[in-house]
Image (cartoon, rainbow, N blue to C red):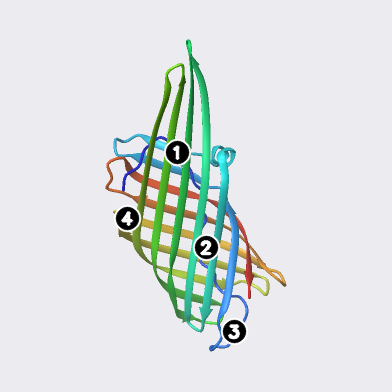
Amino acid sequence: MKYLKNILTGAVVTGLLMGTAPTMASDWEYGVELYLMAADVKGASATGEDISADFDDILDDVEFAYFGSFEAKRDKLTLFANLISVDTESRERETLGPINAELKVGLKNLISTFGAGWEIFDNGKTTLDILGAARYLSLDLDVKLRLDPGGELKESDSGSNWDGVVGLQGRTVLSDRWYLTYEADVGAGESDLTWQASVEINYRFEAFDVTLGYQHLDWEFDDQQLDDLEIAGPALGVRFYF
């Protein structure tokens, strides 16, 4: 996977949904979650240069963003998929003597984890699933430098990355309305190592649940330009069941 090291932005929140309503073993229960994440992005190039983007900077440049998760649960089996897609564009202008310079950087960022879980523990208040999944990471970067006078320079770069991960996901009921969800996984593939961990506190209303949590994703690469990537931050979401 090849990357330019100019700018990395992104925001991610991934959550693996657990059902809250009782269900017959022969029925499927579905859940959808929409969420926002105040994420910071940190990384390092292969030459050791630090790369970072704070949430405030990311928010200023966002043109389009989508965050969501889907789950289908039947008895002990859970099928899940979550997705983040963010398009950002930043512009910088500077005058260098008689030359006016404008730098435009656009980044399309896609992260998805999808797979299956199987319940291995249930004591009435706490359930625990073992997970097997695939994680996909894609970055598309376009850089344009315009000099007046002088002309225009363009460069594009893109890369994608597939990894297999295994992990555990749990849910603990605290009261009639409150419950905790938590998840951790680790794996490798086209990256040297990838892992994620999350925890959420959830409150159940009649028609939906509200979630507040923290998510951390990490990659380590054997790449000519990018050495590691870290995306982490708090998240707020709404979860529906049908």
Q: Which of 196 and 84 is in front in this view?
A: 84
Secondary-structure class at tag 1: strand
State yes or no: discs 2 and 3 in contact (Cβ < 8 Å): no
Tag 2 residue: 15
Q: What residue type is labelled 2?
A: Gly
Q: Which of 230 and 87 is in front in this view?
A: 87
Mark 2 or mark 3: which comes first in sequence? 2
Tag 3 residue: 23
Secondary-structure class at tag 2: loop
Secondary-structure class at tag 4: strand
Q: Which amino acid does label 1 sit on?
A: Ser
Tag 1 residue: 52
Q: Report the residue at 36% width, 64% height from top.
A: 165
Mark 1 or mark 2: which comes first in sequence? 2
Q: Which mark is residue 193?
A: 4
Mark 1 or mark 4: which comes first in sequence? 1
